[in-house]
Image: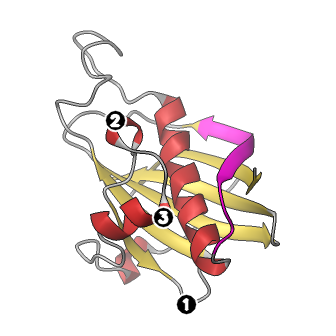
Amino acid sequence: MANELLIDLNSIDLNAVALDRAAVDALLPQTGPMRQLDHVIWKDGENSCGVAVKHIRHDEFWVPYHIPGRPLMPGVLMIEAAAQLCSILQTLAIPNVGFLGFTRCDQTSFRSQVVPGDNFYTLCKLIERNQRRFVCQVQGVVNYKLVFESTITGMKL
């Protein structure tokens, strides 16, 4: 996996909103505390690359439990955030694709921590797509620093 970011965040207005909460609600089945994206900031015209954000709040469900006194965002939730962005891009590219699930998570590396107060940016770049399956490189970024990276595979279930 690369040490450089998949998408140059300096070229994007990180305060922009390409898909607001209502649009994300319409595209994802996850709700409540399992929603790991606040909104999509940017996506390209082919829906093959995108950037989303999750503002990590002090009242997240995991804060009191992971790790008491030193809350760290669980890695599985970082991956979930990335999988949600991948699913949004796949659904936009292939309307009426149906329910998508993620089936693989490969070459995953966690490089730093994510804590309450952070803005956690998820970056996604499509590697492969067809009507039933997608493969994406994903990254998580805080303060322009790479905190995790992985390759996610998903498919229509």
Q: In the current view of this chain or complex, which residue is farthest to the bottom? A: 45
- Quadrant of res 24: bottom left
- Vertical placement of 68 versus 48: above or below? above
Residue occupying image coordinates x 38% and y 53%: 37
Q: Observer-nearest residue: 99 or 112?
A: 99
Callout 3 amino acid? Leu
Above or below for 112 versus 44:
above
Mark-to-mark CA distance, 1 and 2? 30 Å
Amino acid under label 2? Pro
SS at mark 2? helix
Q: Which residue is mark 1?
A: 45
- Callout 2 environment at 10 Å: few (<14), some (14 to 19), or many (20+)? few
Extent of the magenta region: 96-109
Q: Residue at x 52, y 53 (%)?
A: 84
What is the CA distance from the residue labelled 3 to the residue labelled 1?
Answer: 17 Å
Contact between marks 3 and 2 (CB within 8 A): the answer is no
Q: Which residue is mark 3?
A: 27
- Residue assigned mark 2: 33
Q: Which residue is at a point 48% across and 64% down the rendered structure image?
A: 27
Viewer-closest of 71 and 54: 54
* Secondary element at tag 3: helix
Mainly helix, strand or loop, the magenta region? Answer: strand
- The mark nearer the N terminus, 3 or 1, is 3
* Residue 114 x, y percent position in the rendering: 35, 36
